[in-house]
Image: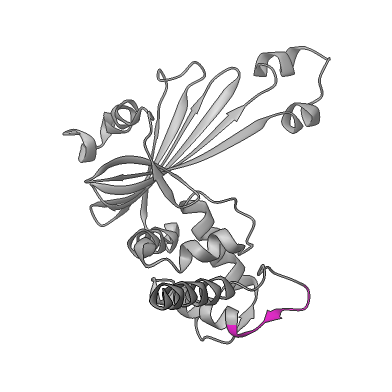
């Protein structure tokens, strides 16, 4: 009985210590937030590949916020630059280290250092489209694909770590009416048109294990039609011809 009670106390103490790891929401403020928790966060981010943060000083400034937004962008969190308990727990969970390190690689891409090629994608959607491809030497690093319709536009951003490992960011813009309606009718102004346009942001990861949607850092099954987009990309690119 005593052993069971002692075991309960130990578990309770461990859970209390764990819950105390997160003490407050960290965000950019006019007077910079500072503390040991931010030092711990900076150290963890540097360990996971975000070494462009520089020294660990315990201050949450614009560079820290920008790094957090990158993580949120690639790993399916709301991109607000705030570190709440959910994001804090995710970053300090050792099982997420590999995924965070992958995000750190692509988040540091500088497109100005890559060779750029552009092309048309007419015929793949009602209003056409375009593609931009970025290479480091002969290696593809980034693709931007835009397809246009009368009532939507889709943007797909492919961030490559290798030909078989890459992130896909999907932005789907849904208009309140067709572009033709905006141009030829007077019932809606241009500003109202864009104010009523909705944008849905979704993140995917393609790896040897399969294709997954990333939502709040979790890998979920998805019915995203990747093969169709790879065909669109492969028109003048050898990378996916065997996919």
The stretch in magenta equals 30-36
Q: Give the left or right position of residue 22, taking residue 224 as reference.
A: right
Residue at the (82%, 24%) spot, across then down: 189
Q: Quadrant of the N terminus?
A: bottom left
Asked if one can make out residue 239 in the rendered structure from this viewpoint, the answer is yes
* Residue 216 in the image: above or below residue 147: below
* Residue 137 in the image: above or below residue 12: above
Q: How many marks?
A: 0
Q: Nearer the viewer, residue 159 or 210?
A: 210
Residue 33 located within the stretch drawn in magenta: yes
Residue 6, x across and y down, in percent: 44, 78
Q: Quadrant of the C terminus?
A: top left
User: Farthest residue toward the left?
Assistant: 242
Residue 128 located within the stretch drawn in magenta: no
User: Farthest residue toward the front?
Assistant: 1
Residue 48, x across and y down, in percent: 39, 71
Q: Give the left or right position of residue 139, taking residue 35 as reference.
A: left
Q: Nearer the viewer, residue 182 or 156?
A: 156
* Residue 86 in the image: above or below residue 132: below
Q: Nearer the viewer, residue 202 or 95?
A: 95
Residue at the (23%, 45%) spot, across then down: 209
Residue at the (32%, 62%) spot, across then down: 98
Q: How is the image coloured?
A: one colour
Residue 26, x across and y down, in percent: 65, 70
* Residue 21 in the image: above or below residue 143: below
Residue 3, x across and y down, in percent: 39, 77
Asked if one can make out residue 101 in the rendered structure from this viewpoint, the answer is no
């Amino acid at each position: 009985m005593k052993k069971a009670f002692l075991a309960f106390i130990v578990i309770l103490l461990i859970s209390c210590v764990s819950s105390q790891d997160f003490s407050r929401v960290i965000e950019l403020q006019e007077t910079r937030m500072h503390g040991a928790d931010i030092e711990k966060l900076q150290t963890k981010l540097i360990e996971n590949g975000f070494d462009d943060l520089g020294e660990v000083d315990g201050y949450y400034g614009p560079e820290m916020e920008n790094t957090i937004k990158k993580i949120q962008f690639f790993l399916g969190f709301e991109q607000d630059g705030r570190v709440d308990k959910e994001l804090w727990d995710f970053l300090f969970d050792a099982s997420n280290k590999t995924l965070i390190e992958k995000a750190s690689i692509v988040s540091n891409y500088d497109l100005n250092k890559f060779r750029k090629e552009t092309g048309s994608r007419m015929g793949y959607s009602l209003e056409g489209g375009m593609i931009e491809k970025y290479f480091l030497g002969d290696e593809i690093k980034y693709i931007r694909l835009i397809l246009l319709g009368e009532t939507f536009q889709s943007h797909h951003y492919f961030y490559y770590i290798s030909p078989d490992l890459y992130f896909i960011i999907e932005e789907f813009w849904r208009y309140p009416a067709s572009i033709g309606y905006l141009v030829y009718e007077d019932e809606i102004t241009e500003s109202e048109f864009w104010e009523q346009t909705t944008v849905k942001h979704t993140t995917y990861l393609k790896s040897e294990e399969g294709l997954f949607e990333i939502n709040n850092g979790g890998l979920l099954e998805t019915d995203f039609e990747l093969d169709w987009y790879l065909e669109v990309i492969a028109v003048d690119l050898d990378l996916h011809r065997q996919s």
